[in-house]
Amino acid sequence: MNGVSKEEFHIYKHLPPTTQTPRLWGATGKWFDGPEGAKIAISTAALLQTSAPQGVEYSVQRYEYGIHRKNRPSKTMIWRNGRLFDA
């Protein structure tokens, strides 16, 4: 955690587009931190993905709070729908 004061992993839900709306997405309210936070968040999102209806996807984003970002996180997607991007 070089220059990072806090790290969290948030789960997002992505809904399929319809004829009236583009793809919608938002936070599920589940987040994890600590040394095993990424693994727990990915396994939880994978479990949610197995019971999701067709077209619904889940992702995990890493929030990094730094000293110089005025308490706003830098967000990076690390996992989506079974694909690991960066962990």
Image: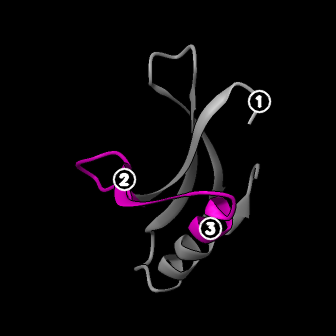
**Mark 1, residue position:** 2
Q: CA distance from mark 2 to mark 3?
A: 14 Å
Quadrant of the drawing holding the N terminus: top right
| Residue type pointed to by label 3 | Ile
| Residue type pointed to by label 2 | Ala
Element assignment for label 1: loop
Element assignment for label 3: helix
Q: Which residue is nearer to you in this view: 31 or 20? A: 31
Residue 18 on image: x %, y %: 30, 56
75 falls in the magenta region: no
Q: Residue furthest bottom?
A: 51
| Residue type pointed to by label 1 | Asn
- Decide: few, some or many residues near mark 2? Use Cα within 10 Å; few <14, some 14-19, many ≥20: some
**Mark 3, residue position:** 42
First along the sequence among labels 2 and 1: 1
* Marks 2,1: beta carbons within 8 A: no
Q: Which residues are magenta?
A: 14-41
**Mark 2, residue position:** 27
Q: CA distance from mark 2 to mark 1?
A: 26 Å
Left or right: where 77 falls relative to 22: right
